[in-house]
Amino acid sequence: MSHDDHGSLKEPIGWMDKPDLVKRLFTVLYVLAGILLVAEFVLGRENAHPHPWEGMPLFYAVYGFASFWFLVLLARPMRKLLIRSEDYYEGGGRYEEDSDAE
Amino acid sequence: MLSNLPPFVVFFVGALLVAFTKGSVRKALLLAIPLIGGLNLWFGVEPGVHLQFELMGYTLTPFRADKLSLLFGYLFHLAAFLGFIYALHLGDGTPDGSVADEVGETDIVGNKSAGLQHVSAMLYAGSAIGAVFAGDLITLFIFWELLAITSAFLIWARDSDRSFATGFRYLIIHVVSGVMLLSAALMIAHSTGSIAFEHIDLESAGAGGWVLLLAFGIKAGFPLAHNWITEAYPESTPTGTVFLSAFTTKVAVYALARSFAGADVLVIVGTAMTFFPIFYAVLENDLRRVLGYSMVNQIGFMIAGIGIGTALAVNGAVAHAFADVIFKGLLFMSMGAVLTMTGRSKGTDLGGLYKTMPITATLCIFGAAAISAFPLFSGFVTKSMIMVAAIEEHHYIVWLFMLFASAGVLEHAGIKIPYFAFFAHDSGIRTKEPPKNMLIAMSIGAVLCVLIGMFPMQFYTLLPYEMDYHPYDTTHVLVQLQLLCFGAIGFVTLMRTGIYPDEKRAVHIDGEVLYRKLGPWLVRSIGGAVARVDMYVRSSVMEFVGSVLRSANRWHGSEGPLARSWPTGSMVLWVAILLAAYLVFYL
């Protein structure tokens, strides 16, 4: 935390304000992902519960990634269909895009 | 000494004491009551029937303990203890550093309703404990209704128009569930002669069994009956929601585990519950409502486990219920802390709070890691039992759905909740950490998440059924980490490509539209149609009566020809004419 030069208000600077740090965090995530992929082949994976798909190499990694995309890609059209104004149940109606401009 | 005293009595007497005390005495009582009750239960209560009597031909069992009910008994004492630590500052005024009054809600903490909140929370916890130790359906019914009534006050305590209406809808839904429970109890008593709260075979129990399942299902948040959860949790006070999230749904999970373990229909219902809420959770703006959807999703796992019905699956379901009360409680506490200090709980309004609330943010991440089932956290050692049981029983499709739902949990509870509240874009809100008691409650929750995750075998000894399951092996840890890590990469790529949907100040239509829009519209339209027909019939009848009156008036009225009073002269004239005519004819 540091003091704002222009006033007495404390204006904290967090690590999220430092793009380099955030970038480094992503790098850590990717490296970790790489290690986990390699680990599957190094450590081997017991297929204790034989499921036709589970046995495929990297099944969980692919499934985890694909699940997020599937989830969001289905949620988007769902929003188009279901979105209403915030006061919908108090008599409001359609959602207007500019209500987010507050 | 107290071993034959039903555990709920401690809370009901406690509520009375809390009602008549103030200040530090009240605070001491709030902590002592769940502690005394919990210690008594842990050391003094053995499995067995401790209180039973006959009433009007029925055998009532207000206190029956076995491993299943004891597990939930311990859990509810723990939840009450944590909840009261978390709510201890009520009545102490606005917390230091809170900027909640900026958004117009002056008493966000609920200081004015502190007494009401404490007393109703104490009665509410006692009702939940009474329900799990009930050995018959009539006793269960009494606590079932008490759960509804006492918890409704935690919603009304927010003291807004919205919470008032929400509280009433909540109460109506739960009273309906209670009435169904009582009807089912009578139907079952009629067909079997017993009101014992035991396993019920849906195929042989007849209609009573199904009505009972639905009564439990409403409280458990079955699809289309789930909206009381997503409606009520965001509308209660910051501390009230923590209590709400702990008891009602878990009593229902307990009831389902006791009566309907192995009912195939629950596998499908549970899987549906894991699936659909995660889409709403992506879109929803109010983070406490996101947690409501997350609650439905987690209960889905439990209900699917109960439906699978093997020892491992049912153990998994109740273990997950135990873990969920703690990690979901922790998440609700962290969002409650944010609401207390900022007056806001929506993704669009929040962000950047890690700068001023770093401890809260860290504790929230512990809860997020636990619910996402990271290895070494509680969710990992509980949810996996249900998943393994599903695959062992060849429920492959169900397993795939649950795996997808697990990724969904990481998305909305693991990433979205901490990310939008504490990180994302800086909202510019500058506040402080919440009161110390809140931080202590959250810290205990976080420690428990880790302890259960690190020492699962000790935790498993509390579970009701024998099983041989070890969560930590290389494969399980590896594949779970892969799922989570690549899920997280999925999130990063979706954010970077701008495909991830923004938070919007909006609502997304869900099942509640049936009773909040469609129901009133139907009543209005049918009422309108009936009113129109009624008007038409009335006006036609009035028209007819009017015309009859008019014609009667025309002929018989004061000026009518048939009512005219004729002068004597004209009468004499007519007599003369008649006489003349007479004469003419006869002469």
Image (tube, rainbow, N blue to C red):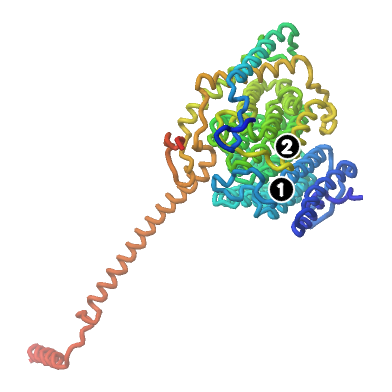
Q: In the displayed structure, would residue A15 be above or below residue B31? A: above
Residue furthest to the right in view is: B1
Q: Indicate the quadrant where residue B392 lies.
A: top right
Q: Quadrant of the C terminus of chain B?
A: bottom left
Q: Residue B55, image x and y in percent?
A: 80, 56
Q: Residue B36, image x and y in percent?
A: 85, 47
Do the residues bearing badges 2 and 1 touch, measured as CB atoms within 8 Å?
Answer: no
Residue name at image x 86 percent, y 51 percent: B5
Mark 2 or 1: the one toward you? 1
Q: How many marks?
A: 2
Q: Which mark is residue B89?
A: 1
Q: Which numbered disc flags the more N-terminal residue, 2 or 1?
A: 1
Q: Residue B44, image x and y in percent?
A: 90, 44
Chain of the residue where label 1 is placed in the rendered structure: B
Horizontal arrangement in the rendering, residue B6 relative to residue B184 (left or right)? right
- Helix, strand or loop for disc 2: helix
Q: Amino acid at mark 1?
A: His
Circle 1 packing at 10 Å, graded few (<14), some (14-19), many (20+), is many
Q: Indicate the quadrant where residue A99 lies.
A: top left
Name the one closer to the observer, B466 or B168: B168
Name the one closer to the observer, B62 or B337: B337
Residue name at image x 58 percent, y 40 percent: B344
Q: Is residue B268 visible?
A: no
